[in-house]
Structures are given as structure tokens and as C-alpha cells.
Image (tube, rainbow, N blue to C red):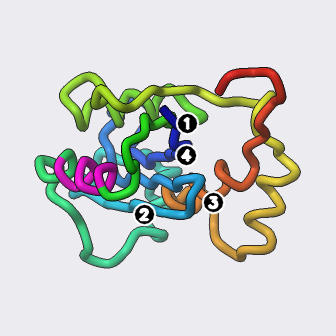
Amino acid sequence: MVNQKIFMDTEFTSFHGLELISIGLAASTGEEFYAEVPYYPERCSNFVKETVIPLLSEGKTVAYEDLQNELLNWFRAIRLETTVKLFYDSEFDKKLFNDIFNGGPPKFVNHKQIGRRNISELLRNHYYAFSCLPEHHALNDARALRYAFLERPGRAM
């Protein structure tokens, strides 16, 4: 069975409250998913208020309780009888994703945290510079992960 690689990023209220604001997924095959959920601005850190909130869409949100079905429908549409390898660069992303699915991912999803050994910071910076897209937007950051991902020969990912 083939593994579909999907790169994920989330934006959230603060490190202390950790409530989802948005989620972005970028598949290695080009498909993308993005959703924003309702949030309480007063629970957001100053960084989130100044940097993340201005990048959000105006008024387009998915009810949090509908997000699981939206994601499952997207996964069904793109996975074509494969398992999904979900790459993320922060444990916060994994926790927020699992929370959407009541504490654990769907059976066909395998998580994999990636870091400096698998991400080229040069390519990541190149992505933002040449795409003219801002950082700290969940879909832009998922795209940057996809662009900068380095698959190491001989290492199962």
C-alpha cells in the first residue's frame, strides 16, 4: 500500500490555552485543505492577535463540530486506497489534529513529526520569499513544509 504524504500546520490561540483557529494540509500530490473555526479573540496571545488574526479570511469559518467530517471527506477524496503519512513540525499540531478526531487520528493516518533533519530552512525561506505568501497562516505554512521537505535516502518516512 502506498503512503500519501500530507503536510499539516495549525494556528491556535496561545501556547497556554491551545484552542484551534485554523488548519492547513498540503498533499504531496498537490491537493490542499484549509479551514478556520470560530475562536475567542480574548483568549489569543498578543503574537496571535498581531500576526495570525490579520491573515485569516473574513467571515469564512467551519463550525468546530463539523470539522471532523470536512476533513474526512477531503481525505476520502484524495487518498485513493492509500494510507496517509501526516507530517507536522510541532507537537501542538498533532494534539490539535487528534482533538478534532476525539483524541486520536483516523486509522488510515500515521503521524510523523519532522524537524531540522527533514526540512531545509533554506528551501522554506525560499518558498516564502518567492511565493510572496506570509508565514503564520496554516495553509501557507503547510505548503512551505511540503516545499522544504527532504526525504532522506534509506530512511522510511
The residue depicted at 47 percent of the width and 50 percent of the height is 46
- Labelled disc at residue 7: 4
Tag 1 residue? 88
Q: Position of residue 15 (x, y in %)?
A: 44, 32
Label 4, label 2: how far apart the Cα atoms are: 22 Å
Q: Does residue 36 lie above or below 104 as drawn?
A: below
- Name the element at disc 2: helix
Would you say 54 lies left or right of 140 here?
left
Would you say 75 lies left or right of 149 here?
left
Q: What amino acid type should be assigned to the residue bearing mark 3?
A: Glu
Q: Point out the stretch of residues depicted in magenta.
A: 69-76
Q: What amino acid type should be assigned to the residue bearing mark 2?
A: Ile
The crowding category of the residue bearing disc 2, from other C-alpha atoms within 10 Å (few below 14, some 14 to 19, many at least 20), is some
Mark 3 or mark 2: which is in front?
3
Q: Earlier in the sequence, mark 4 or mark 1?
A: 4
Label 4, label 1: how far apart the Cα atoms are: 6 Å
The crowding category of the residue bearing disc 4, from other C-alpha atoms within 10 Å (few below 14, some 14 to 19, many at least 20), is many
Q: What amino acid type should be assigned to the residue bearing mark 1?
A: Tyr
Q: Earlier in the sequence, mark 4 or mark 2?
A: 4
Q: Earlier in the sequence, mark 1 or mark 2?
A: 2
Q: Earlier in the sequence, mark 1 or mark 3?
A: 1
Tag 2 residue? 53
Mark 4 or mark 3: which is in front?
4
Q: Position of residue 34 (x, y in %)?
A: 39, 61
Tag 3 residue? 135
Mark 4 or mark 2: which is in front?
4
Label 1, label 3: how far apart the Cα atoms are: 15 Å
- Name the element at disc 4: strand
Label 1, label 2: how far apart the Cα atoms are: 21 Å
